[in-house]
Amino acid sequence: MLTPLGWGTAAGAVLLYAAGWWLGYPEPAALAVAGLAAVLGAVLWTLPRPRLEVSREIAPLKVARGEPAVGVLHVTSAGRAGVRGLTAHDAAGSTEVAVEIPRLRPGGRRTVTYRLPTARRGEIPVGPLRLVRADPLNLARRVREYGTPRTLLVRPKTVPLALLPSGRAYHLEGPTSDRSPAGTTTFHALREYVIGDEMRHIHWKSSARTGTLMVRRLVDASLPTTTVVLEARPDAWADPDDFELAVDAAASVAAGAAAANFPVRVLTGNGPVAETRGGPDDVEALLDRLTAVVPADGPRSLLDAVRRVRAGGSLVVVAPGGADLGRIAAVRSRFDRVVVLRVRPGEPASAPPGVHLLDFGDLDALAAAWHRLGRAR
């Protein structure tokens, strides 16, 4: 409750009073009493507690990096005396946002809106609202908290990227699931007939046994997987903004493949980040998982992580400008297509045989280079 200045004033007053009493001088004792009175007055100054009821909203709860988000506070005066105009601070991650609370009559209610910081990706706890009351001399200070904290999810920023075609098909009779897209190749299960089903898919034996028309559910189990590998070692990224751009690029590639209902896996040297099988909710799941990715030393190198995943489909490596392209080319034979995305390279480089190299300095440049690659194939 007492500030360092308040504790120093109180300690100095006690010593001054003791010295005046010991030496028999009344002046130091009078100064000591004045100091103690100032400290006591400061404590009494901070005792009144505004009775507030605070509810919080965040709109929207999920945003892309850099997009606007606002905190909405509904403040109600629950006391009899009302509340004069106050300045409070709302915690938003590691920063504090000043919030001006207007004057409230008893039972009055106001809504206060303010911008939240979204420049950095991650889960940002918002709240509680802190009301600081201090005396004019700054000898005492009391902090009171109001409202339940909420969480703002700042996800990677993305640009639309089309799915790059893969050269071959795999596992025509392989494992399937209910999330596999409807097709004509692989039998998955039986279900009841609905209007619009093709008559040639009716399973007559099961229909005769159950007394209900049953049809075969056929799926395409040969969709190639897009594997996105993100370099996440701290020593590989000298500029934190470059790493943020790399995460944005990885998210854009993964979201583009997932939006086309194709399987996607994302991994770093620390292991898998996300893996989806193709479905309507995959984009949201991928962006949520990529929100938590931070630079960290992994138990194995990036290429060791690549060698542990199932071969086939497309491999997209997101790496800094000085990445070793020769080592990446070593895994070329395990995938139908290998694309390396280099973030802000210092100088141009030639791509190894069988590897497509795209250099970019922002997401718009990535989208343009990706579009040219798609047209070239």
Image (spheres, rainbow, N blue to C red):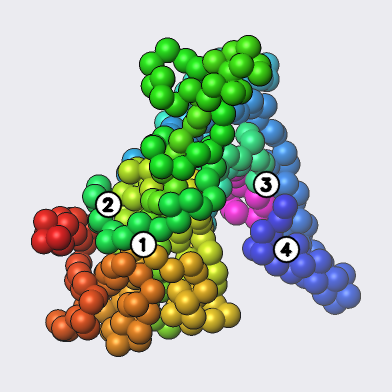
The three-letter amino acid code for the residue at tag 4 is Trp
Q: Residues within 10 Å of mark 3 (few under 14, many from 20)?
A: some
Asked if the residue at tag 1 contacts the one at tag 4, i.e. Cβ–Cβ closer than 8 Å, the answer is no
**Residue at which label 3 appears:** 142
The residue located at (67%, 27%) in the rendering is 51
For this orientation, the residue located farthest to the right is 22
Instruction: Name the secondary structure under disc 3.
Output: strand
Q: Amino acid at mark 1?
A: Gly
Please identify, in this view, whether the residue under mark 1 or under mark 2 is nearer the observer: 1
Q: CA distance from mark 1 to mark 3?
A: 60 Å
Is residue 141 magenta-colored? yes
Label 4: which residue? 7
Q: Badge 1, how many Cα within 10 Å: few under 14, some, many 20+?
A: many
Distance (Cα) linking label 4 and label 3: 14 Å
Label drawn at residue 163: 2
Residue 13 x, y percent position in the rendering: 76, 65
**Badges 4 and 3: C-beta atoms under 8 Å apart?**
no
Q: Position of residue 182 (x, y in %)?
A: 41, 35
**What residue sits 30% from the left and 87% below the top?**
326
- Secondary structure beneath disc 4? helix
**Percent position (x, y) of residue 147?**
63, 34
Mark sitting earlier along the chain (4/2): 4
Q: Are marks 4 and 2 in contact (CB under 8 Å)?
A: no
Counting residues from the start of the chain, the first of labels 1 and 2 encountered is: 2
What residue does disc 1 label?
A: 313
Gap in Å between the C-alphas at discs 4 and 2?
A: 65 Å
